[in-house]
Image: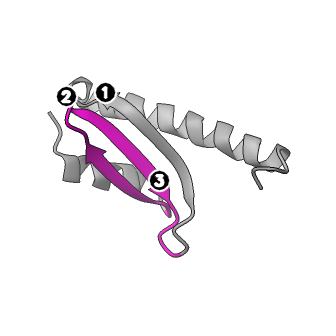
Amino acid sequence: MIYLAQLRAHLERSFSPLACDCSVSGDHSLTVKLYHPASGQVDLVISGLSLDSLRTPEAVAALVEELRYELEIASLQSSTDPDLA
């Protein structure tokens, strides 16, 4: 299994210039938050990810792709919804 610090560093490299916080809850589920380090503005928070499923580099790569997709969707929603802007 990948260590949390390694996962965070990998996500920050993948989503630069965004920063990343990774936290694990009591049920071993992972929460990932991607945000702008200077302003603190949060772009994406995903919770309930299975930490056990991140045992391989391929699984981490799949997570990166999923997060890219979610960021794209969130960006589209915030640019078209005046209540979210």
Identify the image quadrant of residue 49.
top left
Above or below, 80 relative to 50: below
Amino acid type, mark 2? Arg
Q: Nearer the viewer, residue 21 or 55?
A: 21
Instruction: Residue under label 2, please give it.
Output: 55
The crowding category of the residue bearing disc 2, from other C-alpha atoms within 10 Å (few below 14, some 14 to 19, many at least 20), is few
Rendered image: mark on residue 59: 1
Residue plotted at (39% across, 56% down): 20
Residue plotted at (45% across, 38% down): 46
User: SS class of the residue under badge 2?
Assistant: loop
Task: Tell whether position 27 is magenta.
Answer: yes
The crowding category of the residue bearing disc 1, from other C-alpha atoms within 10 Å (few below 14, some 14 to 19, many at least 20), is few
Q: Nearer the viewer, residue 62 or 71?
A: 71
Above or below, 19 relative to 53: below
Q: Position of residue 34 (x, y in %)?
A: 47, 53
Span highlighted in magenta in the image: 17-38
Of circles 2 and 3, the one toward us is 3
Q: Position of residue 57 (x, y in %)?
A: 26, 32
Instruction: Residue under label 3, please give it.
Output: 34
Residue plotted at (52% across, 65% down): 36
